Amino acid sequence: MEKYLENSIVTFVQILRRAGMFVGTSELLDALNAAKYVNMAQKDEFFLALSSVLVKSPVDLPLFTAVFQSYFVPQGDRDAQVDGYREQLEEIEELKDELVFKDEPLDLSEEDLDTYVAMPEAERDKIRQFVEMTNVGYNVTERHKEWLERSIRGALDFYRSNWGQMNIMPMETTGDEELDSILYEVAKNQDAKDLMLKDMKDISGAEVREAVLLVRHLARRLATRIGRRYKRSTKKEAVDVRRSLRKSLRYGGVLLELIHKKKRIQKPSIILFADNSGSMIKYSRFVIQLMLGLSEVLPRMRCFAFSDHLAKLDLRDFNAETEEFGKIDGLGETTNLHASLLEFLEKYDKILNKRTVVLILSDTKTLEYDATAEKLRYIAAKSKEIIWLNPMDKEDWKRYPMVEAFLPHVSMYESSSIEKLAQALKHI
C-alpha cells in the first residue's frame, strides 16, 4: 500500500485499537479531517491535532503517546524495530527448546514464555537447571511432566508478581511483521505503566490509589449507560429533543428529521459473589469497588464474599485503598463454591428472577465442582444470566475441568485487568 498520509493515519488507528484504545469510525474521520489543517513537518503540531480528536480520556494519553512515538518514525528506525522484533521471536524459539521434559515441550502460555525470555540470565539459569535435574532424576516418568509444568508456571508467576517491570502490557498481534514490531516496542517500553491493562493482582501498593480512581471513573461510565431512562428508537413514540435539535443543525436549524426515544428495559438486579481466597483478594477489591460505584443506579444490588461458605457484604463499610481489603471474618481458607451457593439458595432463593444478573468473580478453582455445576444450572434457569469474571488467562482455561463443567451454564469472560473487566461488564 502506498504510504499516503490518509493510509498512515488509518493504520495508526488500527494499532491504537490493537493496543487497547477505544477509537471509533467517527474519531478516525475527525483525525483525517484534522490532519488537513496542520503542518506535517511539525511533529508536535501533528501530535496535538491527532490527540485532540482521538484521546477521549486522560487514561488513554500515555498509550496514545507511546504508539505515536513508535509509529511515526524515520524508515531507518522502522527497520530497526522490525529487526529487534525478529530477534525477539528467534530468541523465544531458542529458549523454548530449553523448557522440555523427555524431549517434549512443556505446556506453557505465551505470557510464561515472554517472562522467561525477559528474565535476567541468572534467574533463567535457575529454572534451566531445575528442568535439567528433573529430566535426569531417579524414577522420573511421564506423569512428572504435569508436576514440572505447574512448578515452572508457579516460579514464573512468582517472578512476575515480585518484579513489576516484568509485567509487559498485553497486545494482540496482527500477523503483519511491521505492525507487530510496533506493538512489541510499545508493550516493551510501556511495561506496567498503563494500569488499565495491568493484571490487577500485580498492582502494587503505591499504585492502588491511582487504580481505584480508574475503577471509579469506569464505574461512572457504566452507571451513565445503565442508568439512562431512555434510548433511541425508530418507533414513533416520545421525541428526543436534544438529538433532534442537534440533527437539525445540518438543515440550518429546521426540524426536518425527528429522533425518537422509548423507555429503557428495566434495570437489572445484580448479585455478586466474590471469591475471598488468597489468590483472589486483590481482584475482589477492585470488582467490589466497581460495584460500589454502580450501586447508585442499581439499588437492587447484593454482594457476597465466599470461600468455604458465604458472607454478606455491606458496601458502605468497604475500603479498597488499602493494600488488601483483608480476609472476611468467619471465612475459611479453602474454596467451596457449592457450599456457598447452597447457603445462598437456602436464605435468598426467592430474590432470583428473570431480571437478576448473577456475577461470579473466581478463578473456578473450587471443591465439588460437579455439584457446583448443578447449582449453577439451577440458578441460570431462575435468573436472567450468570456472568463469570475469570482472572485466569483464557489460554489456561482448557487445563481446568471445572471450567468445562461451568461453561454450559455461564457466560465466562477473562477479567484479569481493569480494561478486560470493563469489557466483561458491558454485558450486564
Image (cartoon, rainbow, N blue to C red):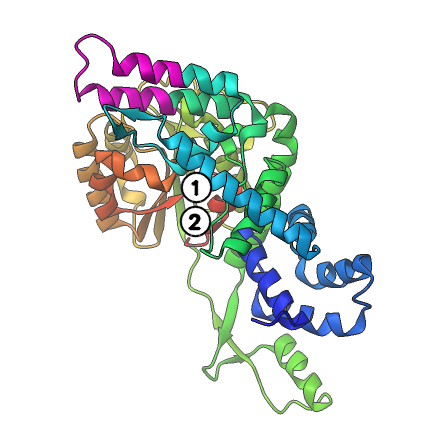
Residue occupied by mark 2: 424
Say whether residue 145 is magenta: yes
* Magenta part, dominant SS: helix
Q: Secondary structure at mark 1?
A: loop
The alpha-carbon separation of the residues under discs 1 and 2 comes to 7 Å
Point out which mark residue 258 bears: none
Marks 1,2: beta carbons within 8 A: yes
The residue indicated by pointer 1 is: 415
Q: Residue at x 58, y 39 (%)?
A: 188
Question: Looking at the picture, which amino acid does disc 2 mark?
Answer: Ala
On the image, which quarter does residue 368 sit in? top left
Left or right of 136, for residue 185? right
Classify mark 2: helix, strand or loop. Answer: helix
Question: Is 25 located above or below residue 422 in the figure?
Answer: below
In percent of width and height, residue 281 lies at 45, 26
Highlighted range, magenta: 128-153
Of callouts 1 and 2, the N-terminal one: 1
- In x, y percent, where is residue 419? 52, 45
